[in-house]
Image (spheres, grey):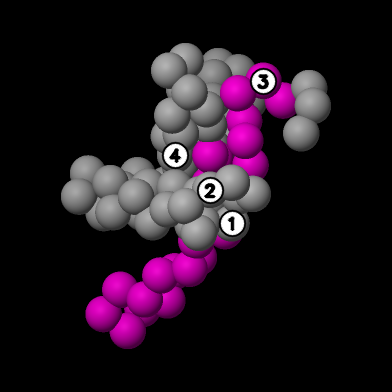
Amino acid sequence: MSGVGRLVGLAVVAMDLGGVEMVLQGVQVIRRDDGLLTVRSPVWRDPMSQEWVPAVVLDDVLTAAIAREVVKLVWQNTPGGQG
């Protein structure tokens, strides 16, 4: 994608948490300065402050697990990736 800076792509993440289905849309896959990928939760722009604010705040353990799975899937589905 051109004109999007470090953004590599957007992901939709579906989870089943103890029988409760949750879908996160707009999960950002971003290329870090060192070339590795990182994942950021969806954000929205606060109309008053104009700052980008997380649309959902999750426990650190759940956030890390989601990030690992998203990055793994990106690499598996990238030409020349691990998959």
Mark positioned earlier in the residue sequence (2 or 3): 3
Q: In the shown orientation, is residue 5 left or right of residue 44?
A: right
Residue 39 is labelled as 4
Count of residue discs: 4
The amino acid at mark 3 is Gly
Q: Residues within 10 Å of mark 2 (few under 14, many from 20)?
A: few
Which residue corresponds to the image point at 46% horizontal and 34% vertical from the top-left? 37
Q: Nearer the viewer, mark 2 or mark 3?
A: 2
Position of residue 30 relative to residue 81, above or below, is above
The amino acid at mark 1 is Asn
Q: Label 2 vs label 1: CA separation?
A: 7 Å
User: In the rendered image, which residue does mark 3 sit on?
Assistant: 5
Q: Label 3 vs label 4: CA separation?
A: 15 Å
Do residues under tags 2 and 1 come within 8 Å of each other at their CB atoms? yes
Q: Nearer the viewer, residue 46 or 8?
A: 8
Do residues under tags 3 and 4 come within 8 Å of each other at their CB atoms? no
The answer to if 53 sits in the magenta stretch is no
Mark positioned earlier in the residue sequence (2 or 4): 4
